[in-house]
Image (cartoon, rainbow, N blue to C red):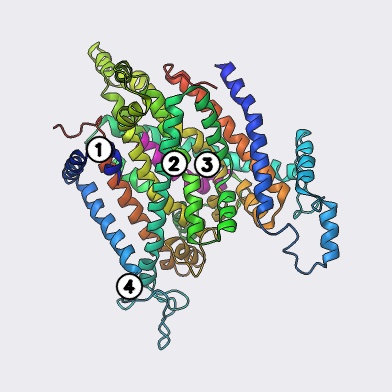
Amino acid sequence: MTASVNVSQTPEMRHVSRFELAFNRLRKIPSAYIAFWVVCLICLMAILSGLGIPLSPYTFDQASDDMLVSPSLKHLMGTDELGRDIFARVIYGSRLSISIGFVTAGVAFLLGTTYGAISGYCGGKIDTLLMRGVDIAYSLPDLLVMILVGVLVGKGTFGILLALGLVSWMGTARLVRAQLLQLKEEEFIEAARAAGQDGLTIVLKHLLPNAMGPIIVALTFTVPSAILSESTLSFIGLGLSAPECSWGTLASDGWRSLRSHPHLLAFPSLFIFLTVLSFNCLGDGLRDVLDPRTRLFKG
Amino acid sequence: MLALLVKRLLTAIPVLLIVATLTFILVRMVPGGPFDADKHLPPAIIANLNAKYQLDKPWPQQYVTYITRLTRGDLGVSYKYVNRTVRDILSEAIPVSVQLGFTALILAILIGVPLGTLAAVNRGTWIDVTAMFVSTAGISVPGFVIGAFLIFIFGIWLKVLPVALWESPWHMVLPSLTLAFSPAAYLARLTRASVLEVLEKDWVRTARSKGLSRWSTIIKHALRNALVPVVTVLGPLTAILITGSFVVEYLYAIPGMGRFFVTAVTNRDYDLIMGTTLVFAALLIVTNAIVDVAYQVLDPRMKVEG
C-alpha cells in the first residue's frame, strides 16, 4: 500500500519495478519478512471468517455443560459464560478489527497528507490558519466526536470507522507539515524552484517523497493504533457492543472475570498484540526499505 | 521568543470560543436531555427542572447566556451532582489528571529518549535489537492489557501495591507505569529513527573529524537536531496523557477528568461537558504553544509564524 502511494506520480513501468525491488529488499530483513506473512495470514483469516468457518462464533453446545471451561483440545481457547467457543469468536472478531485498522489508516493518510502538505508548503498565514484548524480538531475530545458520530450515523461499525477516521488524521497532518517546513529550506528545493518547477510538482516530486519515511512510520502506527483504539473504546464500553464481535468487545467481556477466568481476556489480548506487533515490524522493515535516506542497503 | 509565546496564547482565545461554540452545538444535537434518564419523573417536574436551568429557552438564548457567564469565569452547575458547580468538580479532578499525566510523561521521556539514542548509536548490535524489540512490543500492547497484567501481578498475586483509588504515592505507581508504557516505547522508536537520520549528516562527520569525542558529538550536536521530531509529538502526547488517561482512570478507579467527562456525556450534563472540553482544549493549546517555541530554540532555520 505504501509502495504504490509512494510512487504514484511516476510512470507505470517504474512503479512495478520499484515495488518489486522494495519487496526483494524486505525479504532480507527477517523480522519484517515474517511479519509480512503474519499480516497476510491474519488478513486472510479476517476475509475467510466472513465466508463461514467450521466453528460458529454464536452457536453453543447445548448437550454438554461446556461453559467457562479452560483451554482444552476440544475448545482450544476455552469457552465463555454461554458456552461459545473463544477460538471461533476470536477468528470471527478479526474481521471487524482488521478492517477498522485499514480503513482508518487510509482516511488518515489521504486527509492528513493533503492537509499537512498544503500547510507546510504554503507557510505563512495559510499555515497558521490550517494549524489552528488542527488545534481545534484536536481540542474536541475524541470521545465526544465518536459519541456524536455514533448518534448521527447510527452506532455500529460504520459509525466507529467514520469516528476513528475523523480523529486520526491530525497526527499525520502535523508530521507532514513539520517535515515540509524543514525540507523546504534545503538546497535541492531551492534548485528545483530555480529550475522553474511549479509548487505542485515540487510538493509531489521532491518534498513528499523525501518526507515519505516519517509518513510511513506514521502510517505504521495508524493501522495498529486504530485497532488499539477500537479495542480500547469497546473495552471501556464506548465502542462496539454485543452482538457486534471484535477483539475489543471480547476483551471487554473478559475483563469482568479477570480474577476467576483470565483466559477470557488473555486470548483476545494475545491476538490484538500479535496483529499489532506484526504490523509494526512490517512497517519498520518498509521504512528501512523505502526511505531513500536510511541507506541500509547500498545499491 | 517570549513575544511568540504571548502571541500564540492570545490566539487561544478565539480558538477556545470556537471550541465552546462547536461543543455547545454538538452536545445539544445528541438526542436526549439531562433529565430523560429519570423516567419516573412526571413531565411537569421535568419541565420545572428545565426551566430552573433555563433549558426550555431556545438554543441561541442559552448560548448567549452561557458565553456571558463564561466571560465572568462562571462555568455553570452540574445537573447531576446536585449543588456542585462545574468549577468545584474540575478543581478536584484536574490536579489528579495532571499529576497522573505528568508523572507518566516524565517516566516516558526518561525511559524512551535514552533507550532510542542508545539503540541508534549502537545500530545493528544486540543492544539495538533488544531495545527495538522491547519498544516494538511496547507499542503493540493495549493499555488495558498492561493494566490488567500489572494488576494481576502486583495486586492479586504479589499483593504489594494498591490497585485502586488515588491516595498515597504508592497508589500512583501502577497507574503511571500503565500510562507511560506505550508512550515510552513510542518515543524510543521515534528517537532512534531521528538520531539515525541525523548521524548521517555531513556536519556530524565534520564534528567527529575535528576531534570531538563520540558521545560529545551525539549529545551536543546530533541529539539537539534529532529531537525536533520528538518535540513535535510531545505536544499531542502531553495532551493525550493528561486527557486520555480515561482507560487508566477506569481500570484503577481514579477520580480524574476522564471519568467525570464520560459520566457527564452519558448523563448529558451539559455544563460539565462544556467545562471539561474547554479545560482539555486550553491544556492542549498551551502545550502546543510551548512546543512551537521549543522548535525555534532547537532549529532556528524553521520559520514558524504565529
Q: Residues within 10 Å of mark 4 (few under 14, many from 20)?
A: few
- Front-most of residues B212 and B8: B8
Q: Residues within 10 Å of mark 3 (few under 14, many from 20)?
A: many
* Gap in angstroms between the C-alphas marked 4 and 2: 42 Å
Question: Furthest-top residue in view?
Answer: B210
Where is mark 3, residue-wise?
B241
Amino acid type at image mark 2: Leu
Q: Main secondary structure of the magenta part?
A: helix
Q: Residue at x 81, y 53 (%)?
A: B56
- Element assignment for label 1: helix
Whether residue B142 is visible: no
Image coordinates of residue B206 in percent, x first then y, are 25, 14
Which-is-in-front pick, marks 3 and 1?
1
Amino acid type at image mark 4: Leu
Where is mark 1, residue-wise?
A290
Question: Furthest-bottom residue in view?
Answer: A63
- Element assignment for label 4: loop
Image coordinates of residue B254 in percent, x first then y, are 60, 50
- Element assignment for label 3: helix
Residue B187 on the magenta segment: yes
Depicted A175 relative to depicted B206: above or below: below
* Gap in angstroms between the C-alphas marked 2 and 3: 25 Å
Q: Residues within 10 Å of mark 1 (few under 14, many from 20)?
A: many
Which residue range is magenta in the image?
A: B169-190
